[in-house]
Image: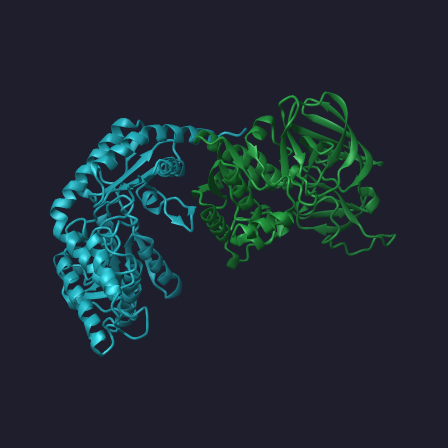
Chain colours: A cyan, B green
Amino acid sequence: MSVYLDHAATTPVLPAAIEAMAAELSVVGNPSSLHSAGRRARRVVEESREQLAAALGARPSEVVLTSGGTEADNLAVVGGYRARHAQDPRRRRVLVSAVEHHAVLDPAHWLAEHEGAEAVELPVDGRGRLDLAALRAELERDPGAVALVSVMWANNEVGTIQPVREVVELAHAHGVPVHTDAVQAAGHVPVDFAASGVDLMTVTGHKLGGPVGVGALLAGRGVGLSPVLHGGGQERQVRSGTLDAPAVRAFAVAAEHAVRTLAQEAPRVAGLRDHLVAGVLTEVPETVLLGDPDPAGRLPGNANVAFRGCEGDSLLYLLDAQGIEVSTGSACSAGVPQPSHVLTAMGVPERMSRGALRLTLGWTTDAADVDAVLAALPAAVERARGAGLVAGRTR
Amino acid sequence: MRVLAAMSGGVDSAVAAARAVEGGHEVVGVHLALSRQPATLRTGARGCCTVEDAHDARRAADVLGIPFYVWDLAERFEQDVVEDFVREYAAGRTPNPCVRCNERIKFSALLDKALALGFDAVCTGHYARVETGADGQRELHRAVDDRKDQSYVLGVLTQDQLARAVFPLGGSRKDYVRAEAARRGLALADKPDSHDICFIADGDTRRWLADRLGEQPGDVRDESGAVVGTHEGAYAFTVGQRKGLRIGRPAPDGRPRYVLDVQPVSRTVVVGPAESLDVDAMEADGARWCGSAPVGEVDVDVQVRAHGEAVPARAAVAGDVVRLALGEPLRGVAPGQAAVLYDGTRVLGSATVSATSRRRATRTAAGAPA
């Protein structure tokens, strides 16, 4: 039996979403076709779009369906930048938090390298929360030069929830649009596109019980977007590609379910998480909780713990061998470990970030899972610490 | 046994892992990430540390049905192998980084970590045999395939390390191993062998060293001390080297000239005719013995290159210093090379060449005739 505690990587697909997707997969129809099969598929997509919009506080016309979070982030940053820059060539600065996902950071730096943009990484505090004074200073330095601000709703590694409302207030005071990557937040904490005031918001299916390969960029009608994928112009002429009716259907079913059950599910998961964190901190010596110590300041399912003197990869192996699946604090590019840019930006020393484990809980997690981890961790950490000690020694 | 299979992404380590699985062991595959900035084939790398190699290792592990992880040993590799390599060249010596990697990384950093995590042994695709002698001691022997034999780069392993090493390929020929890989459905069966130094992606050692050490111009002299040319860094020269000397004036006798000596302190490279490369005796230090250390004088065969011939020698052992009187001359031996001592197919141990002597004079790494 495996204990899956990596829901932030991807969470199991909800049975209702699987059912909806399978049913839709068995029917032919391209939503762009004009005959009755096409009209039927189009109706599925549009009903799903309405369902998604309702779940996320947006209008249906604001939902631009994409292949997932990475594409939506790229469309927001690159497409948003190009549209703003085309309106006024002075706008060339892209302000992003230093703890953004690579799907935001990398396009910002790509624009800097290839299109004359300036990518500015805004600092965060020790909890991983954006330094609003730094954002204010960068905006006020030359407001007319800022093309876009992008600050995630909640961080994928440490779960820290960002002050999105304050970001919007500061940016809008200077007429600068705001994008937020809400991939980790949507369906886990209350996220309302209209109420948040953001102009662009990224969401994805597979973090809330839908399938991988489908997501959306919520784009307010006032914000310009230059297309990144060119072709049939299926989505408002901003995004091309045949609409994936089965995946869109399953995404909408999952989003609706996640939002409808959030009021019960979030406190349930947070309770399990709090029990896990408290247990780890008492059972395992020399252990530090990374991110916001206030449970209200982080995603309900997120725990990120650094075990001093451990290598995360040793712990990952030892737990995996016992059927417990977690993630190290480091991001992997093609399987080669790199120090986490999120923990580095938070000021966590490299020695400590090497011993970080991210344990993320979700809708399938129960008390038995948490108990299994708490039972396995102390011995695993002790063993990994032994391995960490010898790693520094030469025979 | 619980066996950690080090998987480079090549044919040999994949088949070695497969045989460990078949032997009934509980096997876990690990690819060592030895570079923080791994190159890719598209950027021209042809070593064994590319992202593609990690991928090939992962796919082999999938086929074998074993767990697979990438472990980051880049920091240790940089300290113990790469920096050592640069330091040795800067000191006018010619190191063998594969020997260092086996000694300090695969059978030290990796082995120690594996043991601490509950493994019993580390398995690699090296062509060498470990056998148990009559006295219960582990013996390291040459592989059956003498063209692929890698006992030379394993000669630094001690009894402790050999007791934890598994080399499933020592009894097989390479062509058989390739065929076995194909039969097992391993996609990497026809992948070419790696020959280069894995951390020098484009194979240009001289330029790689120049990037790290900068220009250190000096003279090229003949054996009489006369200046016959100049160079940008003595570290770029290895004893026995013929190409790339860029000596304008031909030798008086018109015969090709070779690097005889590299003297980093005075930045002098000494060149001369081929016969001056012949070495009759040498001294090696830092000896490591596979079993108990030989006492006094013993007859051995000595090998100074990974794929060189062994020659008979009389070895006098005193502490970790070995003096070798060669039964026949060896050509082009550089300080820094490993001198591996054999008794028949059995490896006795390995030491690092510190000085060589020829009919005319003795030369040391420091450069002064002794």
Q: Would residue A33 appear left or right of B28 to someone viewing this image?
A: left
* Whole-percent x, y for residue A251 in the image: 22, 59
Residue, x 65% and y 32% (percent of image)? B140
Residue, x 39% and y 44% (percent of image)? A339
Which corner quadrant of the image does residue A352 belong to?
Answer: top left
* Whole-percent x, y for residue B6 in the image: 51, 41
Residue, x 71% and y 23% (percent of image)? B294
* Whole-percent x, y for residue A210 in the image: 24, 55
Q: In this view, does B105 lie above or below A60?
A: above
User: Between B322 and A344, which is closer to the camera in this rendering?
Assistant: B322
* Residue at the bottom extreme of this rendering: A34
Which corner quadrant of the image does residue A106 belong to?
Answer: bottom left
Q: Would residue B56 appear left or right of A13 to someone viewing this image?
A: right
Q: Is residue B166 among the parts visible in the rendering?
A: yes
Q: Would residue A172 appear left or right of B291 to someone viewing this image?
A: left
Which corner quadrant of the image does residue B93 belong to?
Answer: top right
Q: How many labels does the image show?
A: 0
Q: In this view, does B20 lie above or below B294?
A: below
Q: In which quarter of the image is the C terminus of chain B?
A: top right
Q: Is residue A354 above or below residue B59?
A: above
Q: Is residue A191 among the parts visible in the rendering?
A: no
Q: Would residue A327 appear left or right of B114 to someone viewing this image?
A: left
* Whole-percent x, y for residue A254 in the image: 19, 55
User: Between A278 and B230, which is closer to the camera in this rendering?
Assistant: A278
Q: Is residue B137 above or below residue B173?
A: above
